[in-house]
Amino acid sequence: MNSDTPAATAFQTMPIAASHEHPNQFALLKQRRFAPFFWTQFSGAANDNVFKFAFTVMVTYQLSVSWLPPAMAGLVIGALFILPFLLFSATAGQLTDKYDKTAMIRFVKNLEIGIMLMAAFGFSTDNIAVLLLCTFLMGLHSTLFGPVKFAYLPQVLSERELTGGNGMVEMGTFVAILLGNIAGGLLVAIPEVGHRDVAIACVALALVGRVIAGYIPAAPATDPGLKINWNPISETWRNLKLAHGNLVVFRSLLGISWMWFFGAVFLSQFPSLAKEVLHGNEQVASALLVVFSIGIGTGSLLCEVLSKRHVEIGLVPLGAIGMSIFAIDLYFASRGLPASEIMGLGAFLAQPAHWRVLADLGALSLFAGLYSVPMYALIQLRSQPTHRARIIAANNILNALFMIASSVIAGLLLKSNFTIPQIFLFTGLANAVVAFYIFMLVPEYLLRFVAWMLSHFVYRFKVTGDDNIPTTGAAILACNHVSFVDAVLLMAASPRPIYFLMDHNIFKVPVLGWLFRLAKAIPIAPRAENPAAYEAAFDAAAKVLKEGDLLAIFPEGGITKDGTLQEFKGGIMKILERTGQQGINGPQGVPVIPMALTNLWGSYFSRVEKNGAMVRPFRRGAFSRVGLNVGTPMAARDVQPQVLRERVAGLLV
């Protein structure tokens, strides 16, 4: 269907990467650039699970197939569905980068209709071989759609919308999975007409998805000249090497893949947990899936609120901590339950001990949502647009490998006489170890977590004018210096990493010094004290700007001792001189963004008393209001220390 037809006005027309002036992430559902895509994705995920669950129930409970024992049916169907992710993800990534993403989406939805018509024949005739083929083809359908899904969003959403958009998609996916499983199970169980009804539902969902896909606006190719390599093995290896070229992105891919490993352990054990540990029937197993899905959806939606509509990767360590805490508590909540007869949902809910299990499961999945959504958004934001889809394809390959590994490891643990609660304990402890390792490899996650905690639980931090902080390209952030945590608060305000040029003495402060070294802050000493270190600092600052990153400086040269704005030193001019000599940002030079921290003077981390800072905890009480006012950028040619000081002083009013 042509998206320019009159019917397309059912959705509000919005240009690509439109303004983010809307109240919250739910408002995206009223906009044409997002709503048709969301419902297309939703219908596809629902159809996957209607088909898979109905097929699984059919071969497990309703048909006797000598060559496919019921105990193996779920494993075979799951393996067939995931196999295309290993075989064809690399090709799918290339196709998505080369062609218009909307055209790719419509092609995939056309393919889905053909597969579901074949599946309808299989359901109607109880032809297991045809349905197994359709399982593989639906896996191929999802493999092709995966890179499109995550490459489309950063092309049509701004940086401030990306977390909310990913949260909506993540929430919608898990709701669709839940509804698909419920619908598939209910339909296939209807006597005499169940198989026919499943066939109708699958074809209908495919048709609805294709109609909605007709309203998705064009999303032009990012690398139309790309030559497709059809060899899946060599291209898979090439994609992994491509992803490894950006270490932050690659290690984030590993972090997401670990989340899928973690989640697969729990999802695969729900039936056994319900029956063998909780002594519940199929309704109880379904209730566990419902709680898990609601938790993931809730955590995904909370990301935009908690991140203040930025890509806030500080939520990732918070999510990892919660995942481990509640996975470990799930072990303690479920290990000592007394044996009983198999009970229904009502009897299960009547026992208070079971509510702790449900609470742990809901909280665990909520924190998994907080963990995954910012990581996806970071990968989308930091990947080079011309090969973003291939990076997503590499992610899908790694996800599949980690999920297979989770099944193998869980199986080995069960064979080693681990109980299901012990497997949960093992996974929770392993998650803590893996998370710590990742955050040491990529300290930006840990630094942003500290910044997020400080700006939410020590101060009530409000940023005004944050649109003036550029989301791409080099810039110098010039801010007044009020306390020992100024740099941490600037980290919390910026959607991008910041490199700081800081007095070398601050690195001697316990804990904070370690954090600043972790953040790769640049120490600077007075020229009279250490000429070599002085020059090396300016060389390092110029290198940061040459690489297109943000550099923050405190032009006063030290923390104010009386709360007033001190005179600005000439270091800013030396930096601009070097960037001009190197031609960074061309003739216009590097922009300078004036900033002012407000109401921070007098707090625990500022120098107020003769004994200095950090001598009386919560001097002004917890959660005191502080702010950051960000001014409009100044052209390099207009910057002089006194002029810049006046601009910063004006922001303090």
Image (cartoon, grey):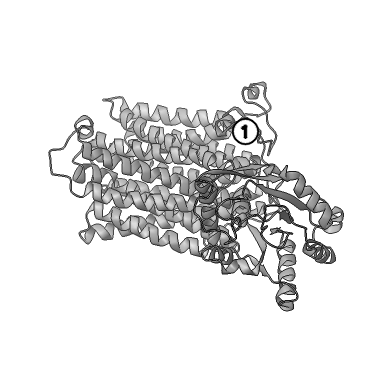
Exactly how many numbered labels are in the figure?
Answer: 1
Does 55 sit above or below residue 533?
Answer: above
Residue, far front: 610
Q: Quadrant of residue 5?
A: top right
Asked whether 184 or 302 is in front, the reply is 302
Is residue 5 toward the left or the right of residue 123 in the image? right
Q: Quadrant of residue 163?
A: top right
Q: Is residue 86 visible?
A: no
Is residue 96 toward the left or the right of residue 86 in the image? right
Q: Secondary structure at mark 1?
A: loop
Residue at image coords 24%, 50%: 332
Q: Is residue 559 visible?
A: yes
Q: Position of residue 438 (x, y in %)?
A: 48, 61
Where the C terminus falls, by quadrant? top right
Q: Position of residue 468 (x, y in %)?
A: 72, 45
Where the N terminus falls, by quadrant? top right
Mark 1: few/some/many CA within 10 Å (<14, 14-19, 20+)? many
Q: Position of residue 93 (x, y in %)?
A: 58, 51
Asked whether 554 or 158 is in front, the reply is 554
Return the residue at label 1.
216
